[in-house]
Amino acid sequence: MALLEVHDLHVYYGNIEALKGVSMHAEPGQIVAILGGNGAGKTTTLRTISGLLRPRGGSITCAGKSLVGIEAHVIVGMGVSHVPEGRRIFNILTVEENLALGGYLIRSQHQLIKERKAAVFDLFPRLAERRMQLAGTLSGGEQQMLAIGRALMSDPKVLMLDEPSLGLAPMLARSVLKTVREIAKRGAAVLLVEQNARQALAIADHAYVIEVGQIVLEGGAAVLAKDERVQKAYLGGFESVAGA
Amino acid sequence: MGVFLQYTVIGLTVGSFYALVALGYTIVYGIIRLINFAQGDLSMVGAFLGWTLLVSFGFEHLPIYLALVIAFVVPMIGTAVVNLGILQFAYKPLLRRSLLAILITALGMSLLLQNAAELIWGAAIEAYPPNLLPLSGFFVGPVHVTYVQIALVTASLLLMGGLVAFVQGTTMGTAMRALAVDHDAARLMGIDVDAVIRIAFVLGAMLAAASGVMLGIYYVQIHFTMGFLLGLRAFTAAVLGGIGNIPGAMVGGLLIGLLEAYTTGYLSGTWEDVVVFGVLITVLIVKPTGLFGERVAERM
């Protein structure tokens, strides 16, 4: 059984079925990309795994334990960390305070907090320079680093990233994704939702293509990158011209 | 000038009570965007619990420090339990529904507390032991300051300091501030949002109860309707400071206290409410975000 195992997930918004039987899995050290257009169900999948949405059917397990019906704040403690779309950092709190909240569940273990903070600053030295600054005053790239760093404070087994490169300059986007590779190398399973399919496939091991709530294609990232349908739907247009 | 300073001393004393109640409004609003109209009545409940202990149970005859500790701590705990009950049974089922429904429920809770208090303690005016604290004082130049005033203002400032230390200095307090920004993001940090809301209600009730006991000691007389006007004035204070903003509630409370003292002193006591609620209306029209509310996102 895989570390993260999603099976036949059905999710509704009112009467509208947003996920129609999504299944996927991820192993430690693996980057799994989820590709798809707007409204395909990528974000819904992540929000359901992290407990912000309740599925109507299907199962989700992390390290063998079911996550279905468990409160979002408890799921964090079970090793699943979710960096939501739009970063959602606490803009009125400082960088340090944001990280402290990332370690909320281990807040009484000061030594551990200190070590994990140091690890985050090691990964994102820019954050260390701005530790006392209000998060709302950071640049877009720094805010994304903070959102990821905050999620790492709970030392997740599964890290879910929703559009981490959105709104970032291409160079910054590449650097963020490179860091994602580094995080996976340290042993976490990474679930990566990305609009930038080319870059996502470049760093991912495995990928799923989701359309109107269903997985329509899956396979090794290198294989999918060469797949004609994927190239047409997600890798075409100016992307190749820009040579990203 | 001496008269002015004398009014100022009175205003700051009363204002510190308002500040405590206003903090309750502001903490709860910051987290769940609810104006908990029962806030003033929680203060009344605290005042009656304190009175029961001091007078009915005779704790006023204990050594003064012990009597005071009991008269403050027990009502603060008792009122916190009452507020948790209100949260659990009245607000929680409505939390994810319309704000209007929960606002009307809050008004209902205010009435419920008043009527419950009337049933339990009766409709008569009760009196705190008048000489619990030494009535004397001293002169600073032309201004007379009583020991009671000093004790009560000091106690208020300590409570406010404790609150600020909690909110600014602990991870739990940081979580409270985070909730003012984004509940879902807070959940994703592992923060038990319901638990933090409960803590906000406990803190709000404790501050209200403390102010109620202080009012009893200061004005001696207490009555089951005393929380109504107190609540409205404290609400005005919270709005004046910028609701959701902790320093704003403190400053707003003191300003309302001063305004009330000057109005009573220079005009007449009958103008108090006209002036105070005139301020409320003016703030709502001219600067709805209040004095400290300029950054709308920054609520606490």
Image (tube, coloured by chain):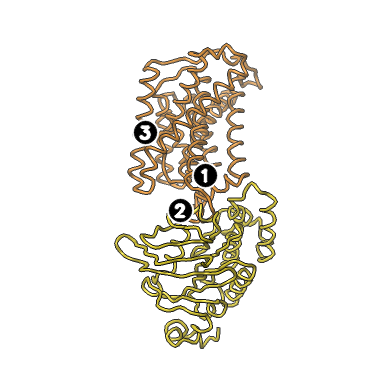
Chain colours: A yellow, B orange
Residue projecting furthest to the left: A15
Q: Tell if the residue under mark 1 belongs to the same chain as the one under mark 2.
A: no
Residue B103 picture location, percent across and down = 36, 41
Q: Is residue B101 visible?
A: yes
How many other residues sit within 10 Å of disc 1, few (<14), some (14-19) or many (≥20)?
many
B99 and B14: which one is in front? B99
Residue projecting furthest to the front: A1
Quadrant for residue A45, please give it: bottom left
* Image quadrant in which the C terminus of chain A is located: bottom right
Q: Give the amino acid type for the residue marked by disc 2 in the picture.
A: Ile
Q: Which residue is mark 2?
A: A70
Mark 2 or 3: the one toward you: 2
Q: Give the amino acid type for the residue marked by disc 3 in the picture.
A: Met
Q: Tell if the residue under mark 2 belongs to the same chain as the one under mark 3.
A: no
Q: Is residue B239 left or right of residue B1?
A: left
Q: Give the CA distance from mark 1 to mark 2.
A: 33 Å
A25 and B110: which one is in front? A25
Label 3 marks a residue whose chain is B
Q: Which residue is mark 3?
A: B109
Labelled pair 2, 3 in contact (Cβ < 8 Å): no
Q: Is residue A212 left or right of residue B128?
A: left
Label 2 marks a residue whose chain is A
